[in-house]
Image: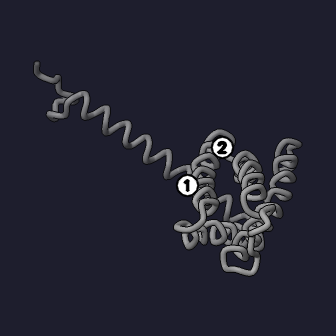
Amino acid sequence: MEESSCAGDGTSIFEAFSQMEKGITETGVMRMMNDINAQMAELPGAVQSWVNWLMIVFVLSVFFLKNHRPARVVLAAFLLTMPLAMGIFAIWQNIHLFALAHLIVWIPLLTYLYRSELSQSDFKPGTPYGVWMILLVTTMVISLLFDVGDVYLVATGVK
């Protein structure tokens, strides 16, 4: 069975649809990334620095993956948070609602980290892993406090 040609240029309907879908997806993703970057650039410098710190603290988990299961869970949560935040942004186009992704993923993560690490009698806060874990948990708690505020401000129309 011969495929019908689209626009007389020898491109099949299936190829044309595939190209159209690719263009829409790439354009949509690029537009969304540009919108995110534009909104991030409008945030105060201290907030931008905090976001960079968050990224660093989560990425440091790679140094502990081999010997610490919680580090693997942290990395998985980090990787889950990003597409979830992008999906939330795609719906509401508001950078402040990245906070929802943090609330959804990080509250269970904090519970897990407390139960599996921080509350254990053999947890060693003076080791590199222990220092990282304390920095991570402290960073997440501070961020969640701001996140609750951001969600409230968006819900009330302030942001």
User: Mark 1 falls on what kind of element?
Assistant: helix
Residue 59 is situated, as x and y percent measured from the top left of the image, at: 59, 68
Crowding at mark 1 (Cα within 10 Å: few <14, some 14-19, many 20+): some
Task: Give the residue displayed 66% in from the left and 70% down from the top.
Answer: 57
Residue placed furthest toward the front: 121
User: In the depicted view, which residue is nearer to us: 27 or 81?
Assistant: 81
User: In the depicted view, which residue is nearer to us: 136 or 120?
Assistant: 120
Which label was assigned to residue 73?
none
Task: Give the residue displayed 53% in from the left and 50% down from the top.
Answer: 31
Residue 105 is situated, as x and y percent measured from the top left of the image, at: 69, 48
Residue type, mark 2 in image: Ile
User: Exactly how many numbered labels are in the figure?
Assistant: 2
Task: Give the residue displayed 62% in from the left and 53% down from the top.
Answer: 77
Which label was assigned to residue 88?
2
User: In the depicted view, which residue is nearer to us: 49 or 122?
Assistant: 122
Crowding at mark 2 (Cα within 10 Å: few <14, some 14-19, many 20+): some
Residue holding disc 1 = 33
User: Mark 2 falls on what kind of element?
Assistant: helix
Q: Is residue 114 above or below residue 94?
A: below
Determine the image quadrant of residue 129.
Answer: bottom right
* Left-right relation of 62 to 4: right
Q: Are marks 1 and 2 in contact (CB under 8 Å)?
A: no
Residue 115 is situated, as x and y percent measured from the top left of the image, at: 77, 55
Residue type, mark 1 in image: Met
* Left-right relation of 154 to 124: right
Residue 33 is situated, as x and y percent measured from the top left of the image, at: 55, 55
Q: Marks 1 and 2: which is nearer the front?
A: 2
Task: Give the residue displayed 57% in from the left and 48% down from the top.
Answer: 83
